[in-house]
Amino acid sequence: MRSDNVTKGVERAPNRSLLYALGYTKEELARPLIGIVSSQNEIVPGHMNLDKITEAVKAGVRMAGGTPIEFPAIAVCDGIAMGHIGMKYSLVTRELIADSTEAMVLAHQFDALVMIPNCDKNVPGLLMAAARLNIPTIFCSGGPMLAGKLTDGRRTCLSHMFEAVGAYHAGKMDAAGVEEYEQNACPTCGSCSGMYTANSMNCLTEAIGMSLRGNGTIPAVMSARLRLAKHTGMQIMELLGQDIKPRDIMTAKAFHNAEAIDMALGCSTNSMLHLPAIAHECGVEMDLDMANEISRKTPNLCHLAPAGDTYIEDLEQAGGVYAVMKELAKKNLIHTDLITATGKTVAENLAPVENRDPNLIRPIENPYSPYGGIAVLKGTLAPDGCVVKQSAVAEEMMVHTGPARVFDSEEDAITAIYAGKIVAGDVIIIRYEGPKGGPGMREMLNPTSAIAGMELDKEVALITDGRFSGATRGASIGHVCPEAAQGGPIGLVEDGDRIAIDIPNCKIDLLVDEATLSARRAKWVCPPPKITTGYLARYAKQVTDATKGAVLEA
């Protein structure tokens, strides 16, 4: 066993003495040492319950003959970090999580790992670490939050909360109305209740084969989540015994499956950053063109919030991620011969599964749309591509041409939106918010929610080299590459320039002649870095662009 490096032989007596200082017995040290990576903390609602999940996982490990040893991973709450400098520190934690987990595991020589994440960057960060370390590993998330309920019985969620602020600034809601959402939008622990980034990544962890069934959908407050955790603890011992490792599971075909299920579920656009980053750690290269190829063949089967008015708890009742996979398998849209963390193939996992609610998970013959939930657009505004969650775009905005309203920061844009300076037809451009230019590639939930709350989401588009929360809806187009700080065309746009968006044909163009653009390019000077010290300054120097998943260069 790997742990023999710290537990066996006279030479390791000093190592053992320190393990004895922790209270471990000879009997425990004779068993496999299973690292339990817990993201529990007291600032993220999705992580406040992870102590209970962790204890259940540890119980499962012990029942199956292992010795669980817990250590922490950090996590940021994107909702709390939203709208201020804190959001610059969200995406960048993904790399910190992967790096620190690698350091802890290699320093202490664990035999296998159980990862217990729940939120936006924590899940992909730990998947990246799992791929990098490549020892037997399984995931058990903390589970989704239940939807909220307003006093009139309507269900609600965090995206409605952000949109309520926009409605207030538009004079469409009073302070008491905002307060009602504030008190009811987030009623329980867990990852926020729609198909936002956290739940997208937890569902895709299940889809790619790195967890047991229900990882993405069993609500955080359900006792079934604790039973899942215990079974996960037991299952890691099976994976260790069979020597099934992450790169055995996360193959090129498995990433194809993940993107197909992403398209069917209508996941967050952040998956277009995280899947390539995880694949990169597996030695599998993904590009944005692959997303469109899969989207063209894969129908969108679910309209969960923010695209619709159903929630992750409803997806669980309908049969969960496996039921969506079963629909795709009917048309051979996913590979079913792949090994998974269950120790079985995808086909074996899906054999007993039924779609229990065809209204929520549309049958493959009757999808919401014949194409997937995400589209990659290219053109003169974004030569290397940009991303939109097309399943959450109103039909009126699928094709749109309008004048640019240009802002060099999120703060400037939100000030103009709240002041009523954006009108129907406008195309808001927010730039210098990319991985390098931000630095940190902030999410733009505040401006997109303001637009939706003001009921302009069917008339106004927003384009950025930053990114969006999974809670964003409307014609919100992010990840524009090259970003402004790299000299991309988005940095050359001026107020009044016409922008043409054609989502069905995957096109986005800046309607300015080349001679004019060349003249602007000759005068363009990159603004000085917004942050020049600390981790963000180092991050800006090393980070790649969004098409590569915003990974760090060695």
Image: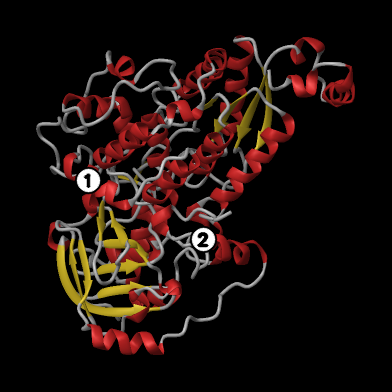
Q: Quadrant of residue 411?
A: bottom left
Q: How is the image coloured?
A: secondary structure
Look at the picture and state if 7 lies above or below 365.
Answer: above
- Residue 293 marker: 1
Report the residue at 65% width, 43% height from top: 100
Report the residue at 34% width, 79% height from top: 406
Q: Residue furthest left?
A: 365
Residue 61 on image: x %, y %: 61, 16
Amino acid at pointer 1: Glu
**CA separation, marks 2 and 1?**
32 Å
Look at the picture and state if 356 lies above or below 189.
Answer: above
Q: Is residue 300 left or right of residue 272?
A: left
Q: Is residue 483 visible?
A: yes
Q: Is residue 221 visible?
A: no
Tell me if label 2 and label 1 are in contact, CB under 8 Å: no
Residue 541 on image: x %, y %: 57, 65
